[in-house]
Image: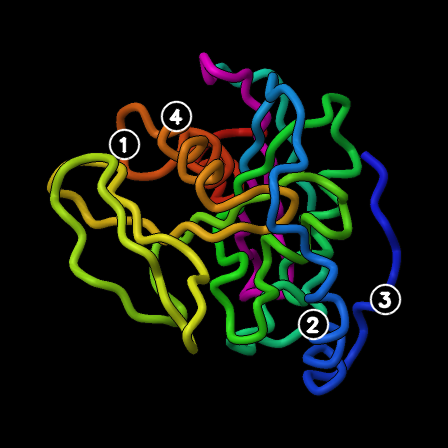
């Protein structure tokens, strides 16, 4: 995969915020994706007391969700942990891994936020824009926003609101299990994002793409 190089990564937190604010308007919130034959998951782990970032990408066939390719890449961690700026800590290794894929995924699900971010530019947005790929953020926890209670049945969801804007959806992927927080990253609408997240979660709370990527990034399975 070809990755755009449009800014430096060795920046201060103040510069990182300015980059997010500059790039945010470039996010496309409509469906700009073709036939989805391959869907990928992305997850990040850390090694050696957080000094090494370990990025894992798992590519699965769609809709049968069979693993066909995976990449694990390592890179020195060069940005501090700053809430709201995690993409500057995690994206460099993630993009390195994506660049090494032989199969270009048609859709990428990221373990993190997309539009549901204080500056509407979470990890899924950052990755999607630089890799020019449809992306969705599927987060385990809420970063921002408020929502009404979600019914306990699988497939139920409620809008996630922040500052008067619907920035995502609180989605129940499994009956009587905690919901996930879905927000668009790039080149996809929220309605379509929800459909694909549900299609990728046939059994567990998290999408199969994310589960595979997490097992790789955390070292639970060998790359």
Q: Secondary structure at mark 4?
A: helix
Contact between marks 3 and 2 (CB within 8 A): the answer is: no
User: Which residue is depicted at the point 45% across and 12% down?
Assistant: 64
- Asked if residue 183 lies left or right of residue 57, the reply is left
Labels 2 and 1: the sequence-earlier one: 2
Cα–Cα span, label 1 and label 4: 11 Å
Residue 57 falls inside the magenta stretch: yes
All told, the count of numbered labels is: 4
Cα–Cα span, label 2 and label 1: 33 Å
Depth-wise, is mark 2 or mark 1 nearer the camera? 2
Q: Secondary structure at mark 2?
A: helix
Q: Position of residue 163 (x, y in %)?
A: 43, 78
Labels 2 and 4: the sequence-earlier one: 2
Labels 4 and 3: the sequence-earlier one: 3
Cα–Cα span, label 3 and label 2: 11 Å
Contact between marks 1 and 3 (CB within 8 A): the answer is: no
Which quarter of the figure is the N terminus placed in? top right
Q: Residue 7 has which mark?
A: 3
Nearer to the camera, 39 or 49: 39
- Asked if residue 30 lies left or right of residue 25, the reply is left
Nearer to the camera, 13 or 180: 180
Labels 1 and 4: the sequence-earlier one: 4
Q: Which residue is mark 4?
A: 199
Tell me where the magenta segment starts and ends, as one range. Answer: 42-65
Depth-wise, is mark 4 or mark 3 nearer the camera? 4
**Local crowd size for mark 2, using a 10 Å CA cut-off: few (<14), some (14–19), many (≥20):** many
Q: Residue 204 has which mark?
A: 1
Q: Secondary structure at mark 3?
A: loop
Q: Secondary structure at mark 1?
A: loop
- Asked if residue 76 lies left or right of residue 65, the reply is right
**Local crowd size for mark 1, using a 10 Å CA cut-off: few (<14), some (14–19), many (≥20):** few
Q: Which residue is mark 2?
A: 20
């Amino acid at each position: 995969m070809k990755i755009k190089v449009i800014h430096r990564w060795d920046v201060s937190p103040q510069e990182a915020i300015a980059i997010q604010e500059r790039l945010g308007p470039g996010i496309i919130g409509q469906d700009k994706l073709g036939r989805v034959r391959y869907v990928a998951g992305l997850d990040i782990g850390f090694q050696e007391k957080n000094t090494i970032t370990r990025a894992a990408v798992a590519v699965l066939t769609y809709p049968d969700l069979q693993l066909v390719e995976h990449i694990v890449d390592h890179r020195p961690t060069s940005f501090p942990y700053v809430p709201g700026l995690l993409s500057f800590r995690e994206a460099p290794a993630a993009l390195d891994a994506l660049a090494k894929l032989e199969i270009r995924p048609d859709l990428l699900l990221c373990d993190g936020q997309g539009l549901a971010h204080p500056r509407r530019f979470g990890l899924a947005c950052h990755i999607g824009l630089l890799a020019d790929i449809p992306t969705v953020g599927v987060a385990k926890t809420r970063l921002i926003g408020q929502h009404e209670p979600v019914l306990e049945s699988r497939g139920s969801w409620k809008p996630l609101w922040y500052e008067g804007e619907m920035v995502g959806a609180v989605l129940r992927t499994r009956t009587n299990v905690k919901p996930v927080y879905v927000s668009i990253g790039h080149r996809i609408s929220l309605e379509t994002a929800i459909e694909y997240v549900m299609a990728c979660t046939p059994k567990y709370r998290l999408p199969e793409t994310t589960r595979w990527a997490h097992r790789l990034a955390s070292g639970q399975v060998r790359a």
